[in-house]
Amino acid sequence: MEVTFLGTSSMVPTKERNQSAVFVSYRTEGILVDCGEGTQRQFKITGIPLTKVTKVLISHWHGDHVLGLPGLIQTLNSSTTEHRLQVFGPKGTKTQLEFMRKAFLMEEKRGGLKLEVHDVDGGVFFETGDFYLEAASLEHSVPCLGYSIVEKDKVHVDMAAVKKLGVPEGPLLGELQEGKPVTWKGKTVKPADVTFKTPGKKVTVIMDTQLCNNAVRLAKDADLLVCEATYADELEGKAGEYKHLTAGQAAAIANKAGAAKLVLTHFSQRYKTTGELEENARGTFDNVVCAKDFMRVNV
């Protein structure tokens, strides 16, 4: 998976930082978590075509997380090539998107965008043979979801072991790879005899929330945790008032969850640099960096 940060500011964009948007590329999927104002332009700058976006995961319906969505939908709808886009979000997303369509006079075009909108309660809400998407409710001033993009473990055939046992290539190997024992020349061959697993990768994105158990649970064992850190630790009171996280609290989530790497984002406009935020987080969790617009992380 490749993670591209398209917007790392919070409510107000700055010269250096756009509003929230994180793009995760995995195989044929392009998963956009939030779509703040100006996200289309950020895609242009990175060179990533908008048609790469197959899914949009909305954390919540505050403007700085969705104001770029009408433009993205209208651009995709104007394409001469049919494109399927799935939008997922907290309960009420279908209604909110319908309000948005009416407000911007967004008309459907034959042969253009095929738009699907889904309300998500939590848990696993999308799954293929390669990966699944999971959501959990966070604690913000409006309904808000955090998301995990989880690659499934991959089963590989140990060809040296297969050759030693004499099992021929073909359907039998396929069954072993699916976890089924097979019989060859009167002997039972178990999957554990000739296969091994490569653990899948996990990326968790936690946007606006106060410290809560669901954030830790969702991020458990994540290879990469992308987490909001709107305020430095000295403003913990303000963070609590607006139901946001400090950098130190984001680090505490990463630490409790056993995440491998933490990237902080969604910074208040008050911070011209992020040194203080990173220092706050590093006191609890060492493998941490502060995101910048257009930064890319391979997982």
Image: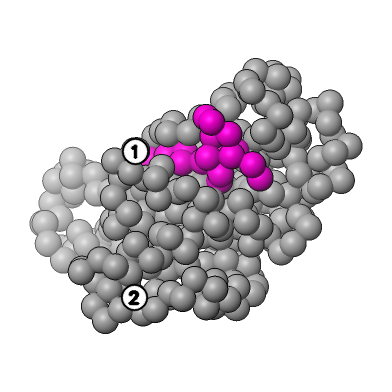
Q: Nearer the viewer, residue 212 or 7?
A: 7
Considering only vertical position in the picture, is 276 above or below 127? above
Q: State the predominant SS element of the stretch in magenta.
A: loop
Callout 2–callout 1 Cβ contact below 8 Å = no
Q: Amino acid at mark 1?
A: Thr
Q: Which residue is mark 1?
A: 46
Q: Quadrant of the N terminus?
A: top left
Label 2, secondary structure: give it.
Answer: strand
**Alpha-carbon span between mark 2 and mark 1:** 25 Å
Q: Residues within 10 Å of mark 1 (few under 14, many from 20)?
A: some
- The residue at 51%/47% (across/down) is 21
Rendered image quadrant of residue 84: bottom left
Q: Is residue 9 magenta?
A: yes
Q: Amino acid at mark 2?
A: Lys
Query: Is any part of residue 113 visible from this angle?
Result: yes
Q: Earlier in the sequence, mark 2 or mark 1?
A: 1
Q: Which residue is mark 2?
A: 114
Please report the bounds of the magenta region as a residue range: 1-20
Query: Is any part of residue 182 visible from this angle?
Result: no
- The residue at 52%/50% (across/down) is 37
- The residue at 29%/41% (across/down) is 47
Task: Point out residue 194 in the picture as x, y percentages from the top left corner.
Answer: 27, 49
Task: Point out residue 200 in the picture as x, y percentages from the top left corner.
Answer: 42, 47
Task: Point out residue 234 in the picture as x, y percentages from the top left corner.
Answer: 84, 26
